Image (cartoon, rainbow, N blue to C red):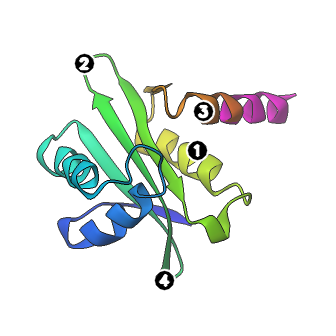
């Protein structure tokens, strides 16, 4: 599994993953979200690829000044849920943004807290 930076050619794939997220189902909202990632250099979108299949998506807003990235969106193909893909995507971001602090928004908060507890349990 690896994260690859979103490219405009992958717009339909990204919109498909975003449509799994509550509040992102309407076409207009999906288009606005994709445009945010395309136009704002502080918003970065990554697709998760395993062999030839895209299996997830994670999007962040990066604050270079404060060295913080906020996970705005996270989505996993329903066929792959429960396999730790989301957790692996969050871990992969730590490698992409070394020395940065990870934050969550209202939508991603519970998932990120769960990842942090999993990490703390692994450290014990």
Q: What is the CA distance from the residue labelled 2 to the residue labelled 3? A: 22 Å
Q: Residue pushed farthest left? A: 39
Question: Which comes sooner in the sequence, label 1 or label 3?
Answer: 1
Would you say residue 11 sits in the magenta stretch?
A: no
Q: Nearer the viewer, residue 106 or 62?
A: 106
Q: Which label is found at residue 52?
A: 4
Question: Which comes sooner in the sequence, label 2 or label 1?
Answer: 2
Residue underneath mark 2: 65
Camera-near label (2 vs 4) is 4
Label 4 CA crowd tier, 10 Å (few <14, some 14–19, many 20+): few
Where does the image place residue 89, in percent across and percent down from the top left? Answer: 54, 51
Camera-near label (1 vs 3) is 3
Camera-near label (1 vs 4) is 4
Question: Which secondary structure lies at badge 1?
Answer: helix
Q: What is the CA distance from the residue labelled 3 to the residue labelled 4? A: 27 Å
**Magenta residues, start to end:** 115-124
Q: Quadrant of the C terminus?
A: top right
Q: What is the CA distance from the residue labelled 1 to the residue labelled 4? A: 21 Å
Which residue is pictured at 23% across the width and 53% down the height?
Answer: 34
Question: Which secondary structure lies at badge 2?
Answer: loop
Q: Residue pushed farthest front? A: 26
Camera-near label (3 vs 4) is 3
Which residue is pictured at 38% across the width and 54% down the height?
Answer: 25
Above or below: residue 20 compared with residue 12: above
Residue underneath mark 1: 91
């Amino acid at each position: 599994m690896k994260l690859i930076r979103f490219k405009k050619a992958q717009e339909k794939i990204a919109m498909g993953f975003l449509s799994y997220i509550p509040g992102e189902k309407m076409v207009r909202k999906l288009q606005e979200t994709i445009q945010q990632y395309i136009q704002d250099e502080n918003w970065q979108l990554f697709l998760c690829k395993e062999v030839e299949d895209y299996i997830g998506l994670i999007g962040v807003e990066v604050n270079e000044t404060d060295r913080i990235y906020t996970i705005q969106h996270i989505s996993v193909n329903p066929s792959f849920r429960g396999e730790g893909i989301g957790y692996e995507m969050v871990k992969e971001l730590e490698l992409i943004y070394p020395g940065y602090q990870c934050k969550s928004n209202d939508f991603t908060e519970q998932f990120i807290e769960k990842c942090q507890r999993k990490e703390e349990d692994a450290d014990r």
